[in-house]
Image (cartoon, grey):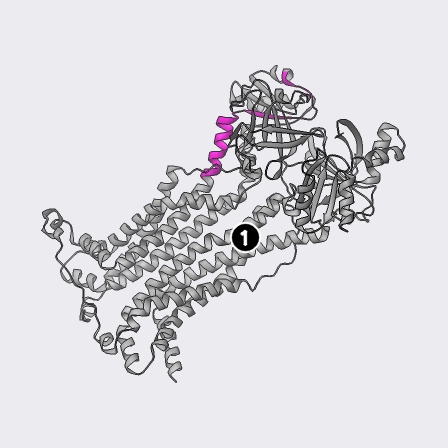
Amino acid sequence: MVRNVLNIKVVREIRNNFKTYLSVILIATLAVTLFTGIFANYKNFNERLDYIYQEANMCDGIIMTNTYNEEIEDYLKDKNLTYEKRLYLPATTGNIDLYLASFTKDSTLNLPFSSSLKEPLTSNMVLVDEKFLTRTNKEIGDSFVVDVSLSGFALNFELSISGTMTHPESLENSTYNPSFVYVGYDALLEAISNQYSLPIQIIEELIGNYYNQFLVQAEEGIFREVKEKYIEEENFIYSLKRSELPSNLTVDADVEQAKQLIYIFPVIFYLVAVLIILTSISQLINREGKNIGIMKALGFSKGEILFHYMKIFIVLSVIGSILGIILGPIIVPSVMGNKYNILYQLPKISLPFFRWEYLISVAILIVITALTSVFACYGAMNQVPASCLRGDNSVQMKLSILNRISFVKKIPLPILMAFRNMKRKWSRTLMVVIGVLGCSALLVCGFGIEDTINHGLDLELDELIPYDISVTYSTYTEKKENISSIEHVAYVDEYGKYPVNVEAKSLVSSYLFLLPEETHIFQVKYQKDSCILSGRLSEEIGAKIGDEINFVYNGNKYSFQVTDIVDFCISQGVFISQTRMSNVEFQPNQAWIKTEDSSYNDQIADSISQIEGISSTQTIKGMRAHANEVIASIKVMTWTIKIFAILLAVVVLYNLALLNFKERIKDIATLKVLGFSKFEVASSFMIEIVFLTFVGALVGLAFGYPLLIAVLSINENPLISYIYHINLLSYFFTILITCGSSLLINVFFAFLTNRVEMVESLKSVE
């Protein structure tokens, strides 16, 4: 019977004060929506990737050497490990960089997980990824010439495209990364044999000496052991587990980044939920003081009374959680998933809508509600029934020394009442500041993401490499004289850009930039002995100024000491003067061009494209447009953060404005009785929250930058490096949006002051 009475009272309380408790439901919905949405995004991405690895039978790791290493193969045999050996070579077709990987009819590891073939895969076939067709303007059935170097021996031969594929080692859609060509062993032998008119047996014997990769199924410890054992050998390049492979490093890192987002945004919303629940339940306990005394007098235990009030907010939290579990997996993955669809070739597979892990967010919210309820109700539960029934709403007012100052006496009464209320309700004042602080920090972060990207682009394209036109060659021959002869061309800087794997503490797939001896466009100062790393690459391989880096180019291993590290936004790699690698023939394949008048850029680009051996031209305007396409998914995330920040601000300010309004009804009635105007009455109500909002927003500005770093550091894009920056205008917009939201909400409640009944409000004893 007792339980039924209290349960009925819970339902009645929620129904009668639904507007008051709406903010609790909304904050619960937002917190759970973010948690479940981000978790669903992580799981969906991870399961799609696992599906690829499973279908392709992706190996656990790869051991790579310069040429065939019989000792390593004997080691793998002694360990009784499953492995396959293959050729894996950097190559080019025209000026298109690619990686060529061989397979045989018996290959079972690292197979394509999907292809356009209508027949079983055989070792006389050649498969390419979709971006290869796009970059070369080829179709299935067309042939292309491959240029490859085997320990200094230059080979070129013709391969015919049998079909397209999606391969686990070539998941990235970016045209900045080399294409992946999966060539059958028999097709490779036949192509070389036809080109050089040699018997296939001789070619097979020759190729056998250059098998340079072992695909291995083994535990992680095996790859560490191989590295420690053979790292000093000149023939050894790397021994890496799957997640460390250059081809898989980015996508696996994105999976981890998607997971880490769970620990940033939801945490902020859960902390704000604590404030909203605390203010709401404290207001309820103050209002229910006499009812608590009656329940105590009737014999209800402290636990029963506490659980009764706790139950109200648990019900509200569960309602919000149900809404969040429905909305989260729909909204967030659809927004964040755009990024992965742009960056990677991922299959569409059947994914569950509900996951049991979503209940963790509900459990967290219920625990927060329970602990907050205990904290808020602790004082009232320990009072004797008589004290609760008598009430203790009086306020001990002390004459402040400020009242003796004539200037203070001239301050309008509504302003004095606002600051008096802040002093009386200092705990709620602190909650307003903290709540708005979180909203402000999120907004600064949202604006800062876009500012950071634009700043990075401006820094590189306007200061570090301020070119007007970028040109890519289809042949490795100098075109400087031809380009310079075009009218309105001021300078031409030819350079070489080649794919390499760079190693220091770790190994990463990147680029080697061979720069001209003298430059007019590349503004980073370098000398003959300079070795400059981009900031992003230095972080990835763990190298700093003075450290030694290694990379393999044209079959030869090079070691250089880092002389400088420069933050680039787009260009990532190792920058070395061609004179530093004097033993390598300088073969330019790209150029930066500075024009006399940028209005002629399009015309000059058209003229350059007519030169024989030019693959593509791109103006600075086109480059910026391409960069905006690349970061489109990041901008979607930016708007997501801004929208959630504004929603959070609305919920926080609505809750606090409503509580402030209800607590000050008697003050409002008193002012009306004393003859104050509607504006003065409304001002007394609005000044407090708007002022606290402004203070909270100002404090939140300081937290926006650290939050920006936290968000972008776990949401890195392989195509762009972030150079953190927030414009002053973004801080201004943050203050404007936050205070503007507060003003609009409080204007709404200010109109409600007209509905306050003076007589009824003044009847209660205080």
Q: Secondary structure at mark 1?
A: helix
Q: Which residue is mark 1?
A: 259
Image quadrant where residue 513 sits: top right
Residue 22's x, y, as percent? 38, 64
Q: Give coordinates of residue 391: x percent, y percent.
A: 22, 72
Residue 332 location in percent, x, y?
Answer: 52, 54
Residue 531 drawn above or below residue 380: above
- Looking at the image, residue 15 sits to the left or right of residue 327; the answer is left
Which residue is at the front of the view, 433 or 378?
378
Residue sitting at 41 percent across and 51 percent down? 645
Residue at horizontal 52 percent and vertical 51 percent from the top: 260
Q: Amino acid at mark 1?
A: Lys
Residue in the image at 41% along x and 43% along y? 705
Place residue 576 in its image quadrant.
top right
Residue plotted at (13% across, 54% down): 400
For the magenta stretch, what is the residue range? 451-480
Quarter holding the N terminus is: bottom left
Does 757 appear in magenta?
no
Asked whether 468 falls inside the magenta stretch, the response is yes
On the rendered structure, is 504 left or right of 414?
right
Given residues 645 and 507, the one toward you in this image is: 507
Judge whether residue 170 can be spotted in this image.
Answer: no
